[in-house]
Image: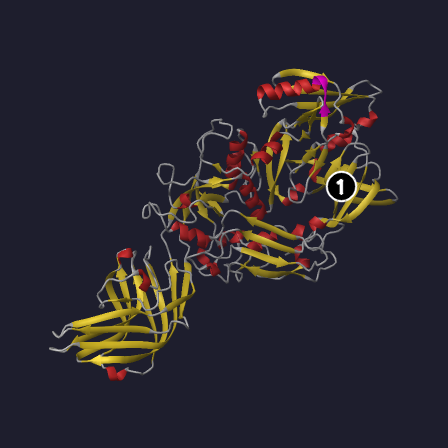
Amino acid sequence: MVLTNAAYYENIRHTLSSTHKPDLIITDPIGYETADEEFVRTIENIGIVTNYSASLKFTNDGLDYIVDVLENYGINEVVSIKKEGQNPNTDEWVELYTSTLETIYNLENNELSVKINSGGFDKLFKARESEKLEIESTTTIDQITIPELATKDLTIDDREIFLTSTYEVSNNDDTAYMYNYTDDKGNERGSSVCVPLLIKSKSHENAQNPYPNTKIGDRFSDGTNEMMFFANSKLRSVLNMDLSISFTPDVIRNENTDFSRFWLRVAIYKNGTDYDYDREIVIWYADNISTYDEIAQTFNVNEVLNLKSGESASLQFSQLLKGGSGTRSRLEINCRDINVEMILTESSTFATTSTKAITLHDLGERLSQLITGKSNRFKASILGRTELGYSQDGEFAYLSAYSGHWLRNFGLADELYKKFTTSFKDYTQTLQSVLNVHVGFQSINNQDLIIAEDFEYFFNPNIVIVLPIPLANVKKHTAEDFVFSSVELGYEKGGEVEGIMGLDEPNGKANWVSNITAIKNPYSSISKYIAGVYDEEKQRRYQREDYPTLDTDRDTDIFIKDCKDVSGVLTERLWNDDFAAAPTGIFSPETAKNLRLSPANNLRRRKSLLATPLKHYQNEYLSFGSSTANSAMTTQLIGKAAITENDNIINSDLGNRLFEPYYIEGEHVVSNELMTQLKGFTNINGVDVPNFYCKVEFTIEGDTTVRHGYIMSVKPDGAGTWKFIEAAFEPVPVYK
């Protein structure tokens, strides 16, 4: 057996390489004995294997080589180091590792301290993952020209949404006062005052609080913004108004009037903020003072307010008097003890529109290209399509993204266009939050790749590595980072939608609480992109054609939509594409969208992880905590049990767990064969899976029990140290 561990070689040598200089065998750097690779991944970055190293100190020829490259060609240049050991039996030089050096160094006392890094895409993405990038740019970060962005057309049909706003009267403002007088010529005079409403709940963007006791002249006078309970409707609105109102009018003064009139009305104004009077809806009318003076009045009415774009509505008391000839006339009325319950509801629709969109696979490819300057380096079978060379369309092949401005049909040709901007970090966070898809970096056939796959891809159950001798000096301890006391899933934005009835929108943020109390370790995975269709619908209704200069708070946000392909055009997936029955607990289920992306359905996709510590608690619950959105919606995926967003999930329904909640650490020498396996791949069902992600079989000293685990870290140096997350002993009944 040939061993890579340097302790088993009589001679060691190091070679530096650069594209600018010939390879050079150098004086062995100080610290090389303990600077072997270490492969590490964590629960936060489960697919990323990072190589760490202690610093090497280069002297003499090694120092000169590195400094010459970096100072003459720049800090971005790559200097590689290859470490080899000479087999004492064959004199053959065996490669122990090849890696790159950090270009940040420290020179002191003629010793150049440099760390070894993993190199490749891992380093590049770590440096650039948070940078905001314009995906329509045709030059990369490094100023490499790339093709124009290719997008797909997406047809967005109407999502019928339910809007409701409620009003009451503040206890501090329950009066309304009017006063008019005429000269001695018998003229008519009048005035109107707004009913002092106070918003109790709001889902109409144009709903507002009128300012108490705001008055205008007679009934035909122009209004003011302060009088309106619904101001300047941007879209056509058909409001159903349920009004319950009581009040007591006190006629304080009625002098020398030929006649007077007093009434309650909804006044409608037009032309936006000009508030030009247009028409009225009379709720109650009286022209005989004796029928209402100091007499409590109560009315329960239902009216339909059909408001055009730019129209406003005000609930008002109005009075009119005609003075007697030859003398001054006065009418003074105060309404007291006003009590109101008013509800505005609307079933709101909007015409079909289209937008350009980019599938999440293509967005990952574009961001990778902008960061690396290289194409076809992003691979994700769950997002893949046959047209891209995948054997079949992935489960979420047409899950797509678009910006708020794309949604309104703005584009590069528009002067006020706000470009589609995002970061690779926000993109991968969304993949993880919504789909439980994680990212890893691989090198296949000397080509660096970005791999985005389901969580379980990174914990493949096939055994491809068997440790030939028992682990020594074993430690077993609780894997606290795999044990979760609570779960929070959903979307950073959405659910509580300003201007739209967010309580019907399911795609907000929700949390569940585990029965685990020994450890406080919350699991939180929140998407930066928006899946809330109500939020999208609000944005969609401000099309560029009608609102070319309007700014909204969602113009630069990124939306995602669960789509399908119909004859080359993206269309929205509805319940009958994926579910056994229409959803319940949601308004207009026939037009509901993004149902597969709800927090409860996102939870389904990570059950095997959440089940890790629950073997002994099968009859206890992952209990629903709270939600910012509609937690009453129930959906049933085909072949699955129905699930409600606020379900308490019995632990046994979480199904098969992948892990026992323990780490096992121990020593086992890393032979050349094992190192080859660690860096190698195994073709499993047509997919080249890194062996590092597959199950390892081993025993421990003093115990013949065969165990299995997934590698979390390996340090080949010295005795060789391994850290496993222990694989589950036996399956639990699968969730049906």
Q: Is residue 274 left or right of residue 44?
A: left
Q: Is residue 509 visible?
A: yes
Q: Is residue 1 visible?
A: no
Give above or below for 482 relative to 447: below
- Give the percent coordinates (x, y) of residue 455: 63, 45
Q: Nearer the viewer, residue 560 or 708?
A: 560
Q: Nearer the viewer, residue 462 or 25?
A: 25
Q: Is residue 518 left or right of residue 599?
A: right
Residue at the top extreme of this rendering: 22
Label 1, secondary structure: give it.
Answer: strand
Residue 442: quadrant of the picture: top right
Count the labels in the image.
1
Q: Is residue 605 left or right of residue 206?
A: right
Q: Residue visible at 70% across and 17% down? A: 61
Residue 725: quadrant of the picture: top right
- Give the percent coordinates (x, y) of residue 25: 72, 17
Pick the quarter of the image with the C terminus: bottom right
Q: Does the stretch in magenta take in 294? A: no
- Disc 1: which residue: 723
- Given the image, on which type of amino acid does mark 1 rest? Lys
Q: Does the stretch in magenta take in 58? A: yes
Q: Is residue 610 left or right of residue 506?
A: right
Q: Residue visible at 54% across and 55% down? A: 509
Magenta stretch bounds: 57-61
- Give the percent coordinates (x, y) of residue 12: 78, 21
Residue at the bottom extreme of this rendering: 290
Give above or below for 485 relative to 3: below
Q: Residues within 10 Å of mark 1 (few under 14, many from 20)?
A: many
